Amino acid sequence: MDEPNFSLGNVRADLLRDSDDWDKFSQFWESLPLDRHMGDGGTYRRRRYSAISHHLDDDTVEVVDQDSFLQSKEINRLNGGIARRFEPIDPALLDTSVFRRVLTHFAELAERSSDTPPVRRVNIHQHRIVATEKELGSPTPEGIHRDGVAHIIMMLVARKDIAGGVSTLYDNAEAPIRTHTLADPGDFIFLDDRTCLHSVSPVRVVPPTPAGYRDMFFLEFC
């Protein structure tokens, strides 16, 4: 069995520069459409999705034509087995300095830890999980799972008026190996999806506010 391979950190402290505009990057979470493909009937998730081809040698990005996002039932027990269509990522997000710096850094880490060539498909996901007085928000309603890719960067963009959202990492036998709460903007977990599974506990609103949210950014290196 492969030894679990993951790392924790904060991109704002470890990677970004003063000239990188985090506010410009985070504003793209204010216009996420409702995810209408939730197998549990939940209305707590907003999201966008796009796929790109990233050429690490010259750091160029090309948007990949896509009709849908598909995972198997084995990977995603709740929402797998169907072609899910989402609104694409705003192209302007791909031009932000935060995105480009995060993409390049973690693409280099992923390339060094695998035998794949330095041109890769990268899935980009934006999620907002909303909690209200009437509904909990579930970041991973499918439970303990892997995403079926090579490497993943899971990065917190914002948390507002919520409690919960504790991440747990597991080995391939589903034994828990680490719990960690992404608490500050820029906090991340980078993991080898082939050696770790993961889940996140539900989030609940903190009274007296009527609603809160957890904004996340994901890059999946295929």
Image (cartoon, rainbow, N blue to C red):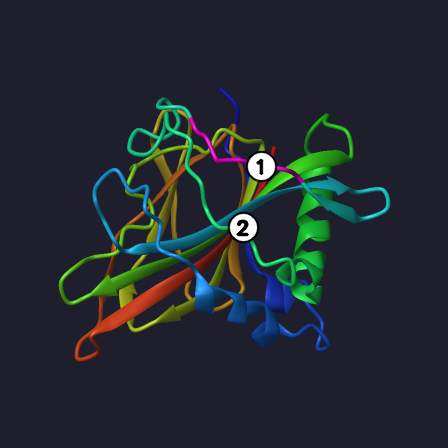
Q: Residue at x 56, y 58 (%)?
A: 9
Left or right of 222 on screen, residue 76? left
Q: Residue at x 73, y 51 (%)?
A: 104
Residue holding disc 1: 66
| Foreground residue among 194 and 140 | 140
* Residue 177 is a magenta residue: no
Residue holding disc 2: 88
Q: Residue at x 70, y 35 (%)?
A: 120
Residue 68 position in % (x across, y down): 49, 35
Residue 131 position in % (x across, y down): 25, 63
Outermost residue toward the top? 1
Left or right of 41 on screen, residue 101? right
Amino acid at dot 2: Pro
| Foreground residue among 218 and 46 | 46
* Residue 67 is a magenta residue: yes
Tell me: residue 27, above or below residue 194.
below
Per the rendered image, the range of residues in magenta is: 64-71
Residue 10 position in % (x across, y down): 56, 62
Tell me: residue 79, above or below residue 86.
above
